[in-house]
Amino acid sequence: MATDRRVKYTKKVLGEALIKFLNEKPIARITVKEICEEADINRATFYAHYTDQFDQLKKIEAEFIEGINSFLVSYLLTSPQTEIGVVVGIFEYVKQNKQLCRALLGRNGDIEFQEDLIRVISGCVLSEWQGRLNVDRRIAEYMMYILATGCIGVGTLWLEDDCSMAPEQLATLVVQLANNGIAPFLIDKQKQL
Amino acid sequence: MATDRRVKYTKKVLGEALIKFLNEKPIARITVKEICEEADINRATFYAHYTDQFDQLKKIEAEFIEGINSFLVSYLLTSPQTEIGVVVGIFEYVKQNKQLCRALLGRNGDIEFQEDLIRVISGCVLSEWQGRLNVDRRIAEYMMYILATGCIGVGTLWLEDDCSMAPEQLATLVVQLANNGIAPFLIDKQKQL
DNA sequence: AAAAATATTCAACACCATGTCAAAAAATCA
DNA sequence: TGATTTTTTGACATGGTGTTGAATATTTTT
């Protein structure tokens, strides 16, 4: 299949070039010409694989989504399912793809990619919760959306911090906040008196 | 000052044209040429006001941020500050600028704009909470980020629903979830036994 | 209402990334 | 090695870009 070493190499260096530029400027400012110059690949070759830089970005995004999805599926099948375990897994997967994720989620990232991620997280992680909620289906969807976007948002901040915090710690924070909100963290616990 | 009626009209129709296209495709796919044709404004006139379509978008975004910021500041100065009141105010302001917000936050929106919004919300609404949290400053920042991005995320979903839910209802949901998480909404409340 | 100031229009220009092509060269696979 | 596939090369027309100066139109000022 698509295992020709030349094709593999071409896509690899073109992808690296795009990611590099995405850390500097939005996709709209990036030209096919400069991607090819950076990667030292002929422009005609680029067009043999992608229609333009947006197409290239979409395909890289799709590859990542596919990757994290299969990771989650295999995780859910094998491991004992602690509530926090999956969240840790997600953050670890993100950390392993730090540079790519920073480009896709950061300042010059793509909102459609965010939405794809929300879909994956909702599908694999949050969907189970949804059935246990004693609220309207629509309200439950809104609540899941808040949690999913909050999760992605803090993940992005974490990436900008170069993933300095441990994935377990971040996952713990997220799960606690999702379960009980900020109340347990407040200073004035009048109940203690 | 900048009150010449011609300038005002030009910027207005150019802005409307850009927003219209943003509901159809990403800014990168939008050309200065088509913005001007849609607005029936000469291309040279466009360049008298903006360097390109990105510059135009940034200026429209900045205008909105400025608007919501002054709205929040005046709100915090005049009204009795109920915890939920400010959140209602934000959602109402968003609803009043539905079409614009949908373009700026939707599928073809801009992540930098999201970040600007996070900054405003954090600054005006969440900063007070932060001091009351019994956690590290860094952890508190992460928590605020989760709440802010969750808030924006659900706001975007709400916009796509054409703001069908009342702002008060949505604000209530957000505040409850932020304060106590999903626990109070769960079906199996074993504590009741 | 006329004059002065300012904004917009118009036409034309060079520039450059784009997307495509056919033929040659290079690398891979069997 | 020989056949196949990919990449390179150079060339081409196309179209949006950004700028310019003069003409025209509109607003503001006196």
Image (cartoon, coloured by chain):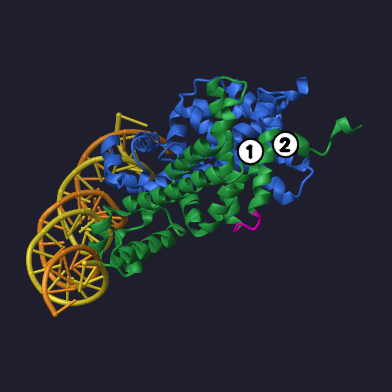
Chain colours: A green, B blue, C yellow, D orange
Picture disc at residue A182:
2
Instruction: Tell me: A55 left or right of B150.
Output: left
Give the residue displayed 42% in from the left and 42% down from the top: A112
In front of the other: B167 or A95? A95
B162 relative to A146, above or below? above
Say which residue appears at 68% left-offset and 47% top-offset: B141
Q: In this rendering, is residue B60 above or below D5? A: above
Give yes or no for residue A163 being in the magenta stretch. yes
Category of crowding for the residue at label 2, using alpha-carbon neighbours closer than 10 angstroms: few (below 14), some (14–19), many (at least 20): many
Q: Quadrant of residue B131?
A: top right
Residue D8: percent from left, percent from top: 22, 72
Q: Secondary structure at mark 1?
A: helix
Query: In which quadrant of the rendered view does residue B22 lie?
Result: top left
What amino acid does circle 2 point to? Ile
Q: CA distance from mark 1 to mark 2?
A: 10 Å
B62 falls in the magenta region: no
SS at circle 2: loop
- Asked if residue B64 lies left or right of residue B179, the reply is left
Numbered label attached to residue B147: 1
Q: Are marks 1 and 2 in contact (CB under 8 Å)?
A: yes
Residue at the spot 71% in from the left edge and 45% down from the top edge: B140
Q: Nearer the viewer, residue A33 or A95?
A: A95
The answer to whether residue B157 is left or right of residue B119 is left
The residue closer to the viewer here, B7 or A169, is: A169
Q: Quadrant of residue B127?
A: top right
Please give the range of residues in magenta: A162-166
Which quarter of the figure is the C terminus of chain B placed in? top right
Disc 1 and disc 2 on one polypeptide chain = no
Q: Main secondary structure of the magenta part?
A: loop
Compared to residue B94, the image places residue A69 above or below, namely below
Question: Is residue B162 visible to us here?
Answer: yes
